[in-house]
Image (tube, grey):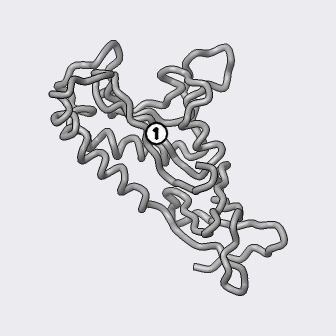
Amino acid sequence: MEKIPFVLGGNLQGGELVVAYPYDMVRSMWKTQDYTPTPDDHVFRWLAYSYASTHRLMTDARRRACHTEDFQKEDGTVNGASWHTVAGSINDFSYLHTNCFELSIYVGCDKYPHESELPEEWENNRESLIVFMEQVHRGIKGIVKDVHGKGIPNAVISVEGVNHDIRTGKKTKTKPQNISANEQVYGLKTKYRTSLQL
């Protein structure tokens, strides 16, 4: 993940019907649960909602809760740290150390469904998986080049108002997630002058 700049990831799990987004670790050592947003919280909430809202059961008001918590009331999504703290989660690692926005997707109430239940579980999640993968096309895409048209690897891409930078890969394409029309995007690299071209 650190070598290839993935931009979207989902780890599939069982045992619940919810999509959890970062951060998964609380900031205070005195709390076991606390809403802990990333600088890109609005993006993560949208990504989680895009999966949950197209799942056949996650947001269905008529379904029973899997266990003790009913995430259907929260549109089938939850901030990981407000649910249960996970130190060193792949979601937090991906966000802090790579370009990847990753979610934990709990696809069904059973942790280990019986083989005979798999076709139904597939149908419950099929559309959600497709919609989630389509989210990779949201936002802006671009190539950071020098004045000679050569790509600049490892350039830092910053979005005005978001305290989280990403970097270009070896092939220099970049894709910040969900940029609104009024936000400025900057590319920075030592020994280069920043310029903006649309």
Mark 1, residues whose alpha carbon is within 10 Å: few (<14), some, or many (≥20)? many
Q: Is 193 positioned to the left or the right of 51 in the image?
A: right
What residue sits 26% from the left and 44% below the top?
Answer: 54
- Secondary structure under the numbered disc 1 in the rendered image: strand
Q: Report x, y in % for residue 53.
A: 29, 41
What residue sits 37% from the left and 53% below the top?
Answer: 133
Q: Report x, y in % for residue 85.
A: 55, 22
Q: Is residue 64 visible?
A: yes
Q: Is residue 2 above or below residue 112?
A: below
Residue type indicated by callout 1: Leu
Q: Report x, y in % for residue 149.
A: 66, 84
Q: Is 42 positioned to the left or the right of 56 in the image?
A: right
Tell me the residue that label 1 is attached to. 103
What residue sits 43% from the left and 38% below the top?
Answer: 11
What residue sits 70% from the left and 72% below the top?
Answer: 152
Q: Is residue 177 above or below residue 149?
A: above
* Quadrant housing residue 184: bottom right
* Quadrant housing residue 115: top left
Residue occupying the far bottom of the picture:
148
Q: Is residue 74 visible?
A: no
Say which of 113 and 198 sits in front: 113
Q: Is 58 positioned to the left or the right of 49 in the image?
A: left
